[in-house]
Amino acid sequence: MVSTKKRIAILGSTGSIGTQALEVIAAHAHAFEVEVLTAQHNAKLLIEQAIRYQPNAVVIGNEQLYGEVKEALSGQDIKVYAGENALASVVQMDTIDLVLTALVGYAGLKPTIKAIEAGKNIALANKETLVVAGELVTQLAREKGVNIYPIDSEHSAIFQCMVGEFHNKIEKIILTASGGPFLGRKKNEIQSVRKEQALKHPNWSMGAKITIDSASLMNKGLEVIEAKWLFGLKPGQVEVVVHPQSIIHSLVQFEDGSIKAQLGLPDMRLPIQFALTYPDRYPSAFPRFDFAQYPTLTFGKPDTETFRNLALAYEALHRGGNMPCILNAANEVAVAEFLKDRVGFLEMSDIVEQCLAKIHYIKSPSYEDYVNTDKETRLKAIELVK
Ligand SMILES: NC(=O)c1ccc[n+]([C@@H]2O[C@H](COP(=O)([O-])OP(=O)(O)OC[C@H]3O[C@@H](n4cnc5c(N)ncnc54)[C@H](OP(=O)(O)O)[C@@H]3O)[C@@H](O)[C@H]2O)c1
């Protein structure tokens, strides 16, 4: 009998988004089947997930862990692969209907491109893919007739507001930002903050990299670039408003001035589920929003003098070409070094700014140009750290 279930590959199944995606799938086992699971280092959790969800294949990124995973799954009917190339080829398997990209950083670019080349629809959490090479990726998706369903809560909010409106022109979109743990503070108050403070997000529990990006407002900058490509907008059509309660996930303003918003408690399972079930909505047991608990929803302007990353991201977006790729690579290095206590919180923006100034500009980059830009920028950023 032919299965009518949607067959899903989850890249980065051991992370914050990956584990929540598996929760959603488990709650709707009649509708979804797990086809592929992947992790980078966390062999233990990958093995547990594989035994529970019985995918066709798993990939462990770190090749040194291949033996451990292979041995643990030796009694199961599950193929085991290792390494970056395996990740890029497994997404092309005939049995996959949709690839959910929940891995973190630049590593998402190649497997996402390979999946699109093979005609797979994408549920995209890995925003860095569109930041690095938004033009190339969205152009390829159009050519292949592939849909990219957003998982980022802000972009899912916009997407949900657009249902029934895809033929209508967007005047602008307004991305909401919680402001992170240092909202309202000035430079002198945050220059010596440590990773322990930056990792405490007020509203969301997420992986380390995105949590630091949220504290530095780089996450919002990356989301502005992601939104530009997802919704085919001009940079000037993407606005950011600070909304500390994270209840309104984002808003769309149409040509007639009408604004639509999507609201809910901060819970990533909802946008993950919508990306998997679109155009349908499935029932859920997620906690419901209660207006009485939130008598006040507030809004403000982002402080881009203190949190310069947002301004740098807009600058990279306006300049275009390989500038967002430079921004992303420099930021990935800066965040990794901040997490190792090797650079200060505000120095992360200095590293990004200097890389944007020093790496050579390419107006219309090819895939190879992006790969080289990423490499060159990482070397420069590391040099700046030293
Ligand atoms: N978390 C959220 O609430 C949230 C919200 C919106 C958007 N996003 C976006 O979703 C993506 C994932 O975020 P996350 O918070 O779920 O991250 P995370 O918790 O750090 O998980 C990352 C996942 O990717 C794997 N991974 C790490 N480095 C890799 C590499 N070089 N190659 C292949 N796989 C690798 C990890 O494997 P190991 O576990 O083995 O290391 C893990 O499965 C990011 O792009 C983020 O911006 C996240």
Image (spheres, grey):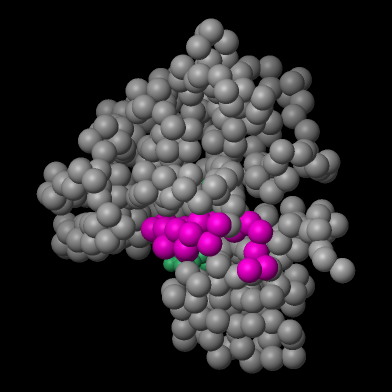
Residue 338 can be seen in this image: no
Report which quarter residue 189 is drawn in: top left
Figure check: 305 above or below 358: above
Q: Position of residue 282 (x, y in %)?
A: 80, 42
Q: Residue at x 47, y 86 (%)?
A: 64
Vertical placement of 13 versus 211: above or below? Answer: below
Find the magenta span and give its range. Answer: 94-119
Residue 8 position within the rendered picture, expressed as x and y whole percent measured from the top left? 67, 61
Coordinates of residue 367 in the picture (x, y in percent): 31, 58
Q: Is residue 116 left or right of residue 188?
A: right
Q: Residue at x 57, y 30 (%)?
A: 158
Residue at the limit of the structure toward the top, as seen here: 256
Q: Is residue 263 left or right of residue 347?
A: right
Q: Nearer the viewer, residue 47 or 349?
A: 47
Foreground residue, 291 or 369?
A: 369
Q: Residue 263 at x, y = what percent?
A: 66, 27
Asked if residue 355 is among those painted magenta in the image, a careful observer would answer no
Pick the residue in front: 61 or 204: 61
User: Is 97 in the magenta?
Assistant: yes
Q: Which residue lies at the image location 51% right of the left edge and 51% below the top edge?
A: 144
- Residue displayed at 62% across by 22% down: 165
Q: How many marks?
A: 0
Quarter of the picture containing the N terminus is: bottom right
